[in-house]
Amino acid sequence: MLDEKQRRELLDRLVHSPSYTVAYRDVELMDSAELRHVRMELEFLKTDLILRREKVESTIVVFGSTQVCEPAVAQKRLDQARARLTDTPDDPRRRREVARAERLAAKSPYYDLAREFARLVSSQCQGNGRCDYVITTGGGPGVMEAANRGAHDVGAKSVGLNIRLPKEQEPNPYITPELCFQFHYFAVRKLHFLLRAKALVIFPGGFGTIDEMFDALTLRQTGRMQNIPIILFGRKYWERIIGFQFLADEGVIEDHDLDLFHFVDSPEEAWQLIRDFHRR
């Protein structure tokens, strides 16, 4: 027979046992490898429910480099790199820094172009309760910031689908707070990029941008997603880094696969192409 003290001690052990924790509040359980599928489902569902609640009917997704910043900032970074090189003119690393800063400065006008494109789309597609063609980005800096900023300029909503990375990435400040999301799984994030998309507009970028572009091109090539325009901003950049025509000439893609994407060089051209596509 237990006395009252023993009874309380045993009861305390029971209620503080990990097995007694309600399942959905059990952080250790939710973080286990066995529940990866549950975490992925929750990550999809949370975003989907909020977008529905906020009445986001359709999106235009803007991809591009995190390193492309507005011209004034790019010029300042270039000036700083040149000043460091002046101190040690024979340092190969600092010469390389200057060369890279020069190339990024040359691409900085894309920041303004992305901002203007988002401003143009958002000013025409949101209002009177409508939430169509909402600008959606990866939520980070660079071209993504520029696109969210363009929507913010005209008082429109925009979405940011941020991702947890080893090198911490903060969301840019121009995303609509109610539409700022953080993902752990790239796959779920990619699904939300494409699920409501009416167009993809892809500015110059690196591995991440190229990955997202080819993911969409492959899905369009195989008929596994909706028919939407895929727009590559900056013909000279894209034709230099990817030999699209070479792939067709080599026979590894069909000639008609080259029709899956379009090159543009201005916000107006991109927006007109999207409107004409959906009008047809």
Image: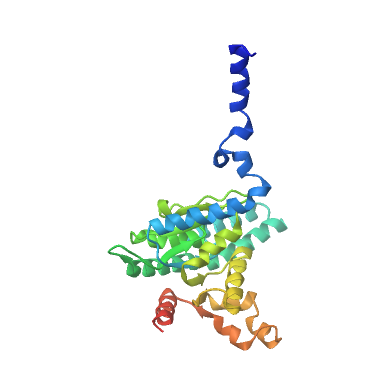
The quadrant the C terminus occupies is: bottom left
State the count of labels: 0
Q: Which residue is located at x 58 percent, y 54 percent?
A: 40
Left or right: 140 in relation to 36: left
Q: Classify residue 28 by image quadrant.
A: top right
Residue closest to the eye, 269 or 227: 227
Q: Which residue is located at x 52 percent, y 59 percent?
A: 138
Residue closest to the eye, 175 or 86: 175
Residue closest to the eye, 71 or 180: 180
Across and down, in percent, residue 204 comes to 56, 69
Of all residues shown, which one is farthest toward the front?
A: 1
The colouring scheme, among rainbow, by chain, secondary structure or one colour, is rainbow
Left or right: 107 in relation to 59: right
Across and down, in percent, residue 37 comes to 62, 54
Residue closest to the eye, 217 or 37: 37
Say whether residue 213 is visible: yes
Left or right: 27 in relation to 197: right
Q: Which residue is located at x 53 percent, y 69 percent?
A: 203
Of all residues shown, which one is farthest toward the left?
A: 128
The quadrant the N terminus occupies is: top right
Across and down, in percent, residue 63 comes to 53, 66
Q: Which residue is located at x 57 percent, y 74 percent?
A: 224
Across and down, in percent, residue 60 comes to 45, 68
21, above or below 101, in the image: above
Say whether residue 90 is visible: no
